[in-house]
Amino acid sequence: MISYSFLDCLWWVSTAYLVIRMLKSRDARWWLAIGLVFGLGMMTKHLFAILIAGVVIGVLLAPARRFLRSPWLWAGAALSLFLILPNLAWQIRHGFISLEFMRWIHGRGVLIGRTASFIPEQFYFSANLAAIPVSIAGLVIRLAGGRSQKFRILAWMGVLPLALRIYLQGRAYYLAPAYPMLIAAGAVVTESWLARLSPGRSRLARIFGSVVLAAGGWPSPRSRSRSHQGARAGGMSRVTCMGNFRR
């Protein structure tokens, strides 16, 4: 069954790609493309606003704040607002019914314990045991100074959504779209470390890493059972929820 989740991942990865292109080229015109993705992301899922908040904080607190003086940034913001304006008008007209729906869904998830294991599930549900260390390395190196300083905005795109998900008691898979950019950043760090090893040790490390990543990506019985349980519970909850709204 197709859902909005795969589009959520697409917009997260697209945002990270466009931000990196903008930072590497120093070309502020990329903000137009970023604004387009922001608008499409918000039309796909309102919780995409959490990533947008990460970008905003990253711009304010990282060297990327120089773009605040560029008209292209504000043009991109205007484009994203233009795209979501019809939906925003509909929400205002109907009393922000989508927020009420999300509040109900979230309250139900907290009540039945679906949000209780947010951190543990990152290791086997949203990502895997092999990918998490690489992701952490990517996050840390982007927060550090030096040559990675100009890409610090990417760290905020990971840190802020994580902090908000924990504070708001979100589901574990909500953070899954953040891992591709963090794994990519961590892979750069890993490659730099491997380059300093001797050819023999580097080859062994690469083989070992490939095996670990392949093994870590194999779904565990627990993650499969959680998926089946989630599908069954999700189907029942949708029926119950629709019944409540029809009343």
Image (cartoon, rainbow, N blue to C red):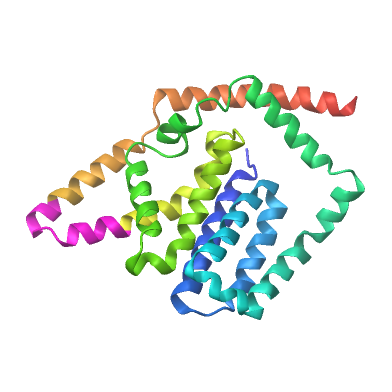
Q: Pick the quarter of the image with the C terminus.
A: top right
Question: Going 30% across and 42% down the picture, which residue do you hit?
Answer: 213
* Quarter of the figure that contains the N terminus: top right
| Magenta stretch: dominant secondary structure | helix
Q: Position of residue 121 (x, y in %)?
A: 46, 31
The residue lying at 71 percent from left, 30 percent from top is: 105
Q: Quadrant of residue 34?
A: bottom right
Horizontal side of residue 30 vs 87, given as left or right: left
Q: Say which residue appears at 49% left-offset and 62% top-offset.
A: 153
Q: Nearer the viewer, residue 112 or 235?
A: 112
211 in relation to 148, above or below: above
Is residue 200 one of those drawn in magenta?
yes
Labels in figure, total: 0
Percent x, y for residue 215? Answer: 30, 36
Residue 240: horizontal and vertical position, in percent? 77, 22
For the magenta stretch, what is the residue range?
188-203
* 6 or 116: nearer the viewer: 116
Vertical relation: 145 (above or below) 44: below
Residue 136 position in % (x across, y down): 36, 47
Answer with left or right where residue 78 lies relative to residue 199: right
Q: Residue furthest front?
A: 61
Is residue 189 one of those drawn in magenta? yes
Name of the residue lying farthest toward the top? 112
Residue at figure coordinates x 55%, y 65% from the top left: 59
Q: Is residue 162 left or right of residue 138?
A: right
Answer with the quarter of the image where residue 120 lies: top left
